[in-house]
Image (cartoon, helix red, strand yellow):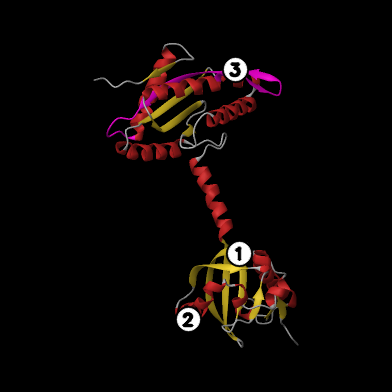
Amino acid sequence: MDDGCEVGGMELHDSCAHDGCSRTPSPSKCQLQLALKSALLENIGDGIIAHTPEGLIVYANERAAEMLGYPLPELLSLTPWDWIAPDLRYQLPSRIRRIRETDGLLFESRCHGRDGLVVCVEVHSRIVDVKPWGEIIVSVSRDMAARSAAQETMRRLAFYDKLTGLSNRARLEERIEVALSAAPHHNEVVGLIYMDLDDFKPVNDTHGHAMGDRVLRVIGERLLNCVRDTDTVARVGGDEFIALFPRLPDRLELASKAQVLAECIEQPIVIDGITVRVTVSVGLATYRDSEHHDELITRADHAMYRAKLHGCAGWEEFLVSA
């Protein structure tokens, strides 16, 4: 009686005695184990291909076929030489030798799939001894585009405000440090504008927090539309925003920018037929030698607070005493 089955082109044999079950296991338990192995291989998010050192493919899962753009039966009829990028094929013999010499090899590669598809992958390969067939090279491949997308998601979570999509404080501080490090090499001004919406709480109390969030998004979009690509706009608190201008001709230009941003924010906002008006208090600060990003933010914050004390909807500049 043949106790084996075929999964993805590779014959799997009952190994229950080696997997910790009894020496005379029930057929149903062995079938469950084989089905589970098959399900794990077919549902993993990575592509898996097993082949002999000569290139004969004995197993591939659906994810591998999907990554390369082939129907699974067609992929099983190919060899690794068929999909490895032509300029990388010369590496195969030495790579197989290195896989033999190690407990597994991690490397990046480029594959040419069906219809001109090009896929950059991260591959982990190792050799397993499968009796009675001998050495089988098992490679697990991950699409690097998917990894890059995941990294971009993590980057956005780390450096961008979830509500508005603007930079957050961490990214702002990073951008300020870059601007301050470059400042000694040119004669231009690094300027910071700290903006705090006046009495924003009534907006939430009157129209609800969902409406308040939508108002903040609109303000964020308006601020982005009022600055250059080289500038940075960040949301640093519930209703607080900071704009960084890394290269301005003088302090007067920073004051002009503050006026533009304030007017931009104070234009009526209409959402679902509801008109919302907000005003903003603004503080300005400019770079001075040997300054850290915390100092620049603090000075702009102090100027904004003074503007609040003098009455809402105004602006103040932090001036360094002689």
Mark 3 or 1: the one toward you: 1
Whether the magenta-drawn stretch holds residue 65 is answered as: no
Within 10 angstroms of label 2, few (less than 14), some, or many (20 or more) residues?
A: few
Local SS, label 2: helix
Please indicate whether residue 181 sits to the left or right of residue 144 in the image.
left
Of residues 80 and 103, the one nearer the viewer is 80
Please name the amino acid that badge 1 sits on. Val
- Look at 61% across and 72% down and name the residue there: 83
Identified at 39% across, 29% down, the residue is 191
Mark found first going from the N terminus, 3 or 1: 1
Tell me which label, 3 or 2, sits earlier in the chain.
2
Q: Is residue 135 left or right of residue 250?
A: right
The magenta segment: 266-292
Indicate the quadrant where residue 50 lies: bottom right
Dot 1: element: strand
Quarter location, residue 114: bottom right
Q: Are marks 3 and 1 in contact (CB under 8 Å)?
A: no
* Residue that appears at 45% across and 77% down: 102
Residue nearest the observer in this picture, 210 or 194: 194
- Mark drawn on residue 277: 3
Residue 118 circle label? 1
Circle 3: element type: loop
Comparing labels 2 and 1, the label whose residue is closer to the camera: 1
Q: Which residue is mark 2?
A: 97
